[in-house]
Image (tube, rainbow, N blue to C red):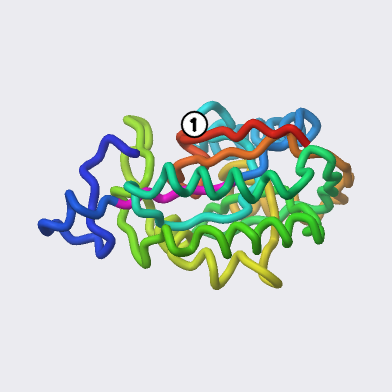
Amino acid sequence: MSENKMASPGGKGTSSTVQNPVTAIDIVLEPDTIMIQRAQAANAELRKNFPKGYSLDAEHKPHISVMGGYFYTANLEKTYAAVEKVLATEKVLSWKMKAFKYYYMPLKEIGLGGIVVEPTADMIRLQKKLIDALTHFMSPTGSAAAFATTTAEPNINEATLNAVATYFSEHTGEHYSPHVTIGVGTVDYLNTLLAAPFPTFTFSAAGVSVYQFGNFGTAAKLLHPFKLTQ
């Protein structure tokens, strides 16, 4: 959990603050070195364009989100155990995925860019299994205190709060668009990036982990890696 004071599920500083702390978590596929290298190369170009953006590092790990949201902190160990049971029914390490284009989410004069991955039946099936297994561990709401922060990034922006709050309505089932976020750039640069031909490539998953969300929806703090055998 973040070092910030925890908030109640409603985000208000009441006596329930201590009773019901919430953590914003992201269950992710860890991509292999093929995807990581492509994402890091794209991030380096974004940093040249917009130096105030972030690097892909230990607090901004390249990842593919499968399921996320606000979870009661007291239930996290039970959540991890439930995820482990789901993963035992899948052969994640054998999956092949295809990256086919760039995209970005506009944030006024800047944008949050990413590499889009074609959703597969495997990924959609895993997401549904996780949703079925985990929703009863979740909080309906959360606040900025549910996120991981650092001295360099002490605040959580409104777009990030909204993205986690609307995860189920905008990022699941037929709306699921798996991607690897590559960083922040100017809208002009990102428009140019999208207009250029994208060299498609295939890659695999190297693992599955749970992270605490950071600003811009980054995988900011590793909470629990899973040991996959298949």
In the rendered image, the quadrant that contains the N terminus is top left
The image shows residue 169, relative to residue 111, as above or below, that is below
Measured as percent of width and height from the top left, residue 180 is found at: 67, 45
In the image, 163: left or right of 45? left
Query: Who's the residue at 45% across and 42% down the image?
Result: 212
Q: Nearer the viewer, residue 97 or 75?
A: 75
Residue assigned mark 1: 59
Q: Nearer the viewer, residue 110 or 137?
A: 137
The image shows residue 70, relative to residue 63, as above or below, that is below
In the image, 38: left or right of 164? right
In the rendered image, the quadrant that contains the C terminus is top right
* Highlighted magenta segment, given as a residue range: 22-27
Q: Nearer the viewer, residue 204 or 113?
A: 204
Q: Nearer the viewer, residue 158 or 140?
A: 140
Q: Is residue 170 visible?
A: yes
Q: Is residue 108 visible?
A: no
Q: Main secondary structure of the magenta part?
A: strand
Query: Who's the residue at 24% across and 54% down the image?
Result: 20
Query: Who's the residue at 51% across and 35% down the image?
Result: 224
In the image, 92: left or right of 135? right
Measured as percent of width and height from the top left, residue 60 is found at: 53, 35
Measured as percent of width and height from the top left, residue 216 is found at: 48, 48
Query: Who's the residue at 50% across and 40% down the image?
Result: 211
> Which element type, helix, strand or loop, lies under badge 1?
loop
Measured as percent of width and height from the top left, residue 29 is found at: 67, 43
- Judge whether residue 142 is colored magenta: no
Total marks placed? 1
> Which amino acid type corresponds to the residue marked 1 in the rendered image?
Glu
The image shows residue 64, relative to residue 106, as above or below, that is above
Q: Crowdedness of circle 1 by 10 Å Cα count: few (<14), some, many (20+)?
A: many
